[in-house]
Amino acid sequence: MQGITDRLRNYIMQKKLGVTFFSGVTAVDKKISPEHMADFYEKSLDVLFHHNLDQKVKSIIAHGACCFNRGMNADQQELQLAAEYLRGMDAKECPIPNWLGLSAFFMSNGFFQLSFIVREKYKERLLATSGRLYRWERILAYLENSEVASAQMEIQKLEQSKGMKQAYGSGISTARTFIRMLTEPREQIKNKRDLQEGDQAFYDFLKGKKLVIEGPAPEIEDIDFKGQVLYIRNNDFIDRDEKKTDITYLNYYAFKLYQAEPEKYRKQWKYVCLKKDIKQMLPTVHTRISKNPKEIFLRGHPNMLPLELYDLAGEDIFVTGNNLFVSADIHTREYDKGMDIHEQDTDIILCRDLGQHDVIAQYFFLKNLYDANVFEADSQLTYVLCLGAEKYCRIMDEVHGIARRRM
């Protein structure tokens, strides 16, 4: 029987293998040649699933991933066979980290429906597991499913262990804030904010105003907002247009662009919110560090909508142009050139960022916040959030299944 240290070491190793090493993005970065790509994926699946994956199904998935990365269409009937096989598997047949790793493998290779099925298996296995080793993962799974009472019970158990409480202290705080967003009225959320240096002035600036978060997808309706409006956007828009922006959220790379021409942007932006503390680089005015709830909302998602919602929670928020990469008007962009490409084009290019982030987890969290009336949404995003996660993933397969991904 493994000791706790060995189990923990094995868990961390498998998680790193599953989520980081064996993904389509890594295959590209490692410059795996096209003729060796399918073999690379087969070996990846061996590590993720050990001996439990049927050889025929494994070959189907490996070939489909290879097709996706070479800009060809995978056989949909074969992938459906793989989906039925995975759906019928007992969740206990695969260790917990490997289910999550397999979900990441499918996501990074454009298989949204397979990723959704495996993620549900991951949660099924996780929520049937006792002990403290996976307690934090169970908390996140309960929050994904909006099972607040169960999440709170797990948080209390986690806090009873001094070591676990110390390890997950920031995560616990984030989880409690997320629970407040799901359960408490807007005014109560505002009153319970944990302020950092400079936050009071920022929240005073927001007070009494309509906050409009504009995402990267084309707006499908012109909305006449009444009263004072602040427009909030993120790093996708740097140097791309001249639309009014009051507050912007930047990651490190976008901030480097901002730093190169600060005067140009200071005229437009009242506040710049950064995702992490890079004080040695900060401009002298109107800059704050936004709280990055990395344990709840995964870091670095292209449109950063979850981070913005979390940071602004309690205010009057309207979201437009954030379609979670699926709508009547498909909107993607080439990773290197930032080129807009629409549905009528022959070659739809999948934004490479999509492969590096778990958009299914984001979908669950956004849906929960939407259902809790944390924000309003335009008709495009409302449509997507009302699909339900499984249908959303099926449509994502249809949309991005015809995408050509450039090596």
Image: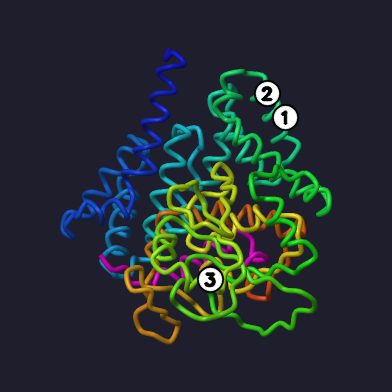
- Residue type, numbered disc 2: Lys
Front position in the image: 271 or 136: 271
Above or below: residue 78 compared with residue 210: above
Local crowd at mark 2 within 10 Å, few (<14), some, or many (≥20)?
A: some
Above or below: residue 55 compared with residue 233: above
- Residue type, numbered disc 3: Val
Image quarter in which the C terminus is found: bottom left
Q: Are marks 2 and 1 in contact (CB under 8 Å)?
A: yes
Residue at position x 22%, y 55% in the image: 37
Label 1: which residue?
153
C-alpha span from label 2 to label 3: 39 Å
Q: Earlier in the sequence, mark 2 or mark 3?
A: 2
Image position of 171 (left or right of 92): right
Q: Which residues are magenta?
A: 383-407
Local crowd at mark 1 within 10 Å, few (<14), some, or many (≥20)?
A: few
Tell me the SS state at disc 1: helix
Q: Earlier in the sequence, mark 1 or mark 3?
A: 1
Label 3: which residue?
326
Image position of 200 (left or right of 70): right
Q: Disc 2 vs disc 3: which is toward the camera?
A: 2
Front position in the image: 72 or 87: 72
Q: Are marks 2 and 3 in contact (CB under 8 Å)?
A: no
Per the picture, the main secondary structure of the magenta-coloured stretch is helix
Residue at position x 62%, y 18% in the image: 161
C-alpha span from label 2 to label 1: 6 Å
Label 2: which residue?
157
